[in-house]
Amino acid sequence: MLIQHLQKLKLKERRMHKLRLEKTVVKALEKINEPYYSKIKTAILNLAKNPRPAGYKKLKGRAGFRIRIADYRIIYDIFDKVLQVDVIELGHRKDIYL
């Protein structure tokens, strides 16, 4: 029984969500300087492995989730049935929730 459970966990670990980035997210990322650029890029890529990382929050008043990277926010949706993460918005915390 335990072996079957561990095998199922290993299968789940192999599954990665497909990432889809809005064009505005790519443009916003290009405008961000180091060291934030690398941290944000890594965080976005890690969403494919774990779309619910430590510190993620479900947004209130609108669809989606958010993660914080320093003063920047990444807004995204998760579609578990099709294993897809759509990154909708990226921006500084003072501008992102307007």
Image (cartoon, rainbow, N blue to C red):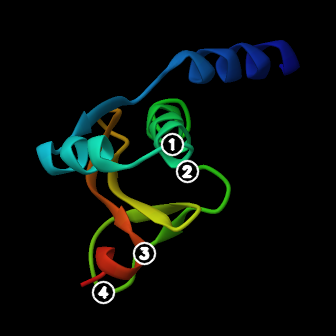
Quarter of the figure with residue 83: top left
In the depicted structure, whether residue 83 falls above or below residue 68: above
Which disc number belongs to residue 61?
Answer: 4
Q: CA distance from mark 2 to mark 3?
A: 20 Å
Residue corresponding to mark 3: 93
Where does label 2 land, which residue?
Answer: 52
The residue that appears at 60% across and 15% down in the rendered structure is 11
> Given this view, does label 2 or label 3 mark the residue nearer the observer?
3
Residue depicted at 46% across the width and 31% down the height:
45
Please provide percent x and percent y for residue 36. Answer: 52, 48
**Regarding mark 3 in the picture, which secondary structure is present there?**
helix
Does dot 1 land on a helix, a strand or a loop?
Answer: loop
Q: Say what amino acid the circle numbered 3 marks.
A: Arg
Q: Position of residue 22 (x, y in %)?
A: 17, 45
Nearer-N-terminus badge (1/4):
1
Q: Is residue 73 above or below residue 48?
A: below
